[in-house]
Image: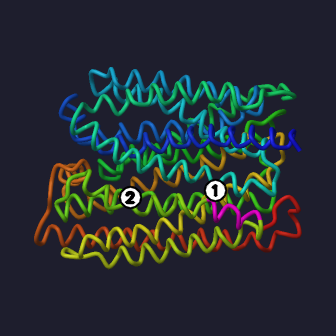
Amino acid sequence: MPGNQGTTRSTNLALIVIMIGVLIAAVDTTIVILALPVMRQDLHVGFASVVWVVLGYLLVITLLATQVGRLGDMFGRVRMYEAGFLVFVLGSALCALSWSEASIVAFRIVQGVGGALISANSGAIIADIFPPEQRGKAYGYTSVGWSVGAVLGILAGGVLVTYLSWRWIFWINVPIGAVALFLALRALPSDHGYRHRDLDLPGMATLGAALFAVLWAMVQLTTSAFSEVISLWLLGGLALLALFGIIERRAKDPMVPLSLFRVPTLTPSFLASFFQGLANFAVLFLITMYLQGVRGLTPLDGALLLVPGYLVGSVIGPIAGRLADRLGPVIPATVGLSIQMVAMLLYITLGLTTPLWVVSAISIVNGLGSGGFFPSNSAAVMKAAPRQVFGVASGMLRTFANVGMVFSFSTALLVAAHALSRGLAFAIFVGNAVVTGAAGAAFLRGIHASLLASVAALLVAALLSATRAAHRSRDPQTRG
């Protein structure tokens, strides 16, 4: 019994370390958005360029998630996770010292490398430490880290930007990351028994270039009309994706084992993550632009209205995780997506004079749905994936989600730019402009159209999630 107590204590401490890593990533997502207006003014960055402070970080995590997950499988997931903290702390310090538009974007990319190492390997470490029947609970607690981090990012961002300087939103990561690294070195088990494999450099380069080309084309559409250059980037990216598939089929030790897509549970889980990210990530920006651009709230006041949703999500996550362990991931994940569809339909009812408490109430509904989906879907993937490729599976899940998030972000800005001039759309995004009258009504109609598209994407995600029930007998590693 003492030995079991010691083991339980060590796994709980390891889970806390993983939660801290997720929390840091969440803080850095929301805290930067609130600092964009003052950052733009201080560094003399244009409206279009300041978006890359957000997108640069997200794009790097998207491009590297699968690659660094593969490195975790090869050289040790814990080692790569700990290296992520080192790189993240370094990138944060460099961001705080930025002096120009180019430097802040470049250093955010460094930060993104660290974030990729942390996020891609954290799910695999949980799968290493916890048995399949307890992984849903563990992923539920990591969703608490994400929700709490998002709230802290909103609160800390407002305080630091208001009373100190935007540079402190990056300096604050340095001590937190250092403490997290210290705890990781003490709490996480050493990596043993990993088989050395040849690094699939051709595959890594081709997939990275393909994703970058497609995402670059999508992002360019937020600031420019569709053109021949953008179409060439898009077609080139798709051609490189096809080439990547050929390379992986012939590779002796492929970076992304295509055999994973033959595991019944994995393909619908990856695609459900993509469509959920496509639907839901835009909502944060669309509702933020509604609160700032139509209702005239400051970025901090607008963000505070969304805090209840994050808090509810942090409470629901562990509950949904336990349900996924008990009932299988299909029911909590699919119900969560269905609840999010209800939230999108409720957001569509927002008007020019809707009471602001309604926004908070709807955010709670959305938090219920997201808290049900994320831990359940993560548990489904990591229960079905073969142990030797936990890192790749975790990275692929992150990649699918992030690709959806980037496309979602592009959609949000395209909607704004369709109803208004692009300059005014970006000014609304960073909290520097308000639209009223006919312009406000037109902008709101655009937001409603985008939210309706989000409902359609969530419906596809829910159907994909539900199809996993048919695979239960064929996929014994998952219970749904």
Residue named by callout 1:
140
Graded by Cα atoms within 10 Å as few (under 14), some (14 to 19) or many (20 or more), the crowding at tag 2 reads: many
Tell me the quarter of the image containing the N terminus.
top right
Q: Are marks 1 and 2 in contact (CB under 8 Å)?
A: no
Labels 1 and 2: the sequence-earlier one: 1
In the image, is residue 206 part of the stretch drawn in magenta? no
Q: Taking the image as drawn, is residue 102 in sight?
A: yes
Which element type, helix, strand or loop, lies under badge 1? helix
In the image, is residue 323 part of the stretch drawn in magenta? yes
The colour scheme of the drawn protein is rainbow
Q: Mark 2: which amino acid?
A: Val
Alpha carbon separation for disc pair 1 and 2: 19 Å
Q: Residue at x 17, y 49 (%)?
A: 432
Residue named by callout 2:
307
Left or right, 234 with respect to 9, comes to left
Give coordinates of residue 277: x percent, y percent. 52, 58
Tell me the quarter of the image containing the C terminus.
bottom right
Left or right, 382 with respect to 171, comes to right
Which element type, helix, strand or loop, lies under badge 2? helix
For residue 250, above or below residue 455: above
Q: Which residues are magenta?
A: 318-325
Give coordinates of residue 363: x percent, y percent. 40, 67
For residue 170, above or below residue 417: above
